[in-house]
Amino acid sequence: MMSRVRLYLKLARFDHWIKQVFILPGIVIAVALMGLENHTFSLPLVRVILGVIATCLIASANYVMNEWLDARYDAFHPTKKNRPAVAHNLNPALIITEYILFCVVGFVLALIAKSSALLWLLAALWLMGILYNVPPIRLKEIAYVDVLSESVNNAIRLLIGWFLVATTKAPPVSIVFGYWMGGAFLMAAKRFAEYRMIGDAKVAGQYRRSFMHYSEKSLLISAFFYALLAVFFCGIFMIKYKIELLIAIPFLCGLFCFYLYICYKPDSSAQRPEHLFAEKGLILYLALFISLLCVLMFVHIPALQVLLEPIMVGR
């Protein structure tokens, strides 16, 4: 009985809850910007905790739906064929019940948190799960749209973090788009690593129909494009709100390059972002990068102001 229960709970991918760490930058940015305007600003800790847990539950609901609807496609994947929905005969009624429970509890927690923005954003996260997984729309089967529609969840998580803290103001559009494009880079890199591991275009197309229209070259170029857009939008945010952060741009570019390097490893961790903690070099680089951002938030370098001055060069 317990082993059967574990199979159904595996559908919820609790190990993927680590992805909710993408909420944290939204909280940090809101605290930083609100703190600059109001020195008495305080963090609503209870609302933040409830919001993070609610997001985890809605994400798990989407994972349950994903595993059930993808079972016949995952059978063609070298590792995903071992997922419970593929390898075991599970009861659809119980899967639907599990899905509904995660949804209900998640939205109830959002109501308890008393944040209308959180409720709407969780509804958006839930809706993206429907559009991404459920026929006849099933955005995951459309090349390039699959990456952009899945990575928009990154932007939603950023917004969740922001509105858990700042309830009266919207975040800068530039950082929202930068975060979205950063997520698109990660997703395109994941597709690239998957395509390389499968190693057979026909089998890859059976596993994921969007792969019929991809190649290693197109996936790599698209990942590069998304990285450029992420740097562009983040640069706009940095110039407008804290120009000292521009010093971190070369290190951000290095982070994208480091991630692409990992994508070339056999059975790359980029296919399973929840396992990236095993990449000690990446984690160390990321820790140093975040430390640099924190330092730059609290320093003032007057010499950088010259970048904001409209200087005309001529005879």
Image (cartoon, grey):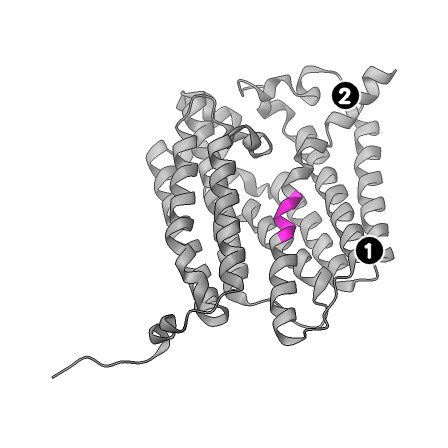
**To which residue does mark 1 refer?**
46
Indicate which label's residue lies in the foreground, 2 or 1. 1
Q: Position of residue 60 (x, y in %)?
A: 73, 38
Q: Residue at x 40, y 21 (%)?
A: 199
Quadrant of the frame with the N terminus: top right
SS class, disc 2: helix
Identify the residue at horizontal 66%, vertical 61% (top origin).
Answer: 162
Amino acid type assigned to the residue bearing label 1 in the image: Val
Residue 14 or 146: which is nearer the viewer?
14
Label 1's element?
helix
From the viewer's perspective, tell me whether residue 207 is left or right of residue 132. left
- Using the rendered image of the protein, determine whether residue 248 is visible from the camera's viewpoint: yes
Residue 287: image x %, image y %? Answer: 52, 43
Percent position (x, y) of residue 129?
66, 44
Seen in the image, is 71 located left or right of residue 97? left
Q: Residues within 10 Å of mark 2 (few under 14, many from 20)?
A: some
Neighbour tally class for label 1: few under 14, some 14-19, many 20 plus, Cα within 10 Å = few
In the drawing, does residue 222 fall left or right of residue 52? left
Q: Gap between marks 2 and 1, in whole Å?
A: 32 Å
The residue at which mark 2 appears reads as: 7
Q: Is residue 269 magenta-colored?
A: no
Report the span colored magenta.
20-24
